[in-house]
Image (cartoon, rainbow, N blue to C red):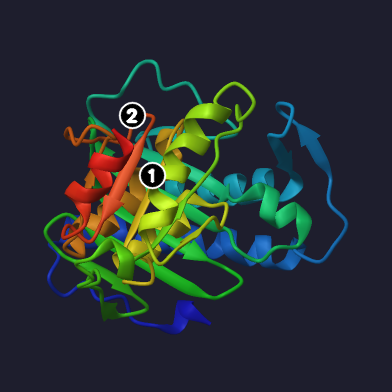
Amino acid sequence: MTERIELPLSGADSAMAAIVRTAAAAALAAGAIIRDLYEKPHQIRMKGAIDLVTEADLASEAAILAVLSREFPGVAVLAEESSPNYRQISSGPQWIIDPLDGTTNFAHGFPVFAVSIAYSSGQSSQAGVVYCPMQDELFLAWRGGGAWLDGRRLAVSRTDRLIAALVGTGFPYAIRENLDDVLGKLGRVLPLVRDVRRAGAASVDLAYVACGRLDGFWERDLKPWDTAAASLLVEEAGGQVSDFGGKAWDPFRPEVVASNRLLHRALIDLLS
């Protein structure tokens, strides 16, 4: 499994190496739990009309917090299930955690989901790990250190025409209230690209932009834990991340456009 791969941390200072190594260990531990629970009966609780949480979300988050608190006691935590209040943004170091991004996929047996862990300072992600347990793929990045997949350095695609692009998107939980806007943006993009994918896990979509599987991605009504780690992957792989208007982006903005940079202006023009 991925835990046997030596992490590519030779270019990181000792403090950053410890952060990335700890985040990777926590993600791998959580991923093992999710993988073990995948084909078992699930305990599902609804947080909204179509927003759900399972026993795997809770078990994964507990495992992550155990690792992080042991290695970095006292660091603030923003986590989807146990501490989701982000109205007060920490000005100091903070872990931003999604224990299972793609819970609906997991609950339905659709094997596209991830564990996402970012280490941030204020509004800026300094390190990020995204682990896809069913594919056993470990994506990681730290600011200034590049983006990596299982020890291989990543680069975004070189696609420079929309008609040759494969792009991804996602739909918000409040789809009924935002249907016209969501379908309007999709309707503007879809005829001009090669195709659109909707995998159901923003961290995976962003990781796929970072490694060139997707040329771009957009989604609205996201939370910090959806994007804090994976947005750094895109940036460190040479891509661009912004809001729908092209303005500077941070994890606390509820919308994201990510691309290989070459297509960014074209996507912004369609989405803004």
State left or right for residue 127 relative to residue 102: left
Q: Residue at x 44, y 57 (%)?
A: 205
Name the amino acid type tagged 2: Phe
User: From what the image shows, is residue 111 above or below residue 44?
Assistant: below
User: From what the image shows, is residue 62 above or below residue 79?
Assistant: below
Q: What label sits on residue 227 in the rendered view?
A: 1
Which of 182/26 is in front? 182
Q: Residues within 10 Å of mark 1 (few under 14, many from 20)?
A: many
At mark 2, the secondary structure is loop
Q: Residue at x 32, y 54 (%)?
A: 128
Name the amino acid type tagged 1: Thr
Query: Could you say which quadrant of the image residue 159 lies in?
Result: bottom left
Q: Position of residue 136 (x, y in %)?
A: 53, 75
Query: Could you say which quadrant of the image residue 134 lies in?
Result: bottom right
Structural distance between the alpha carbons of marks 1 and 2: 9 Å
State left or right for residue 47 relative to residue 3: right
Q: For the view shown, which residue lies furthest in the front direction?
A: 191
State left or right for residue 26 relative to residue 241: right
Q: Position of residue 29 (x, y in %)?
A: 56, 63
Q: What label sits on residue 252 in the rendered view?
A: 2
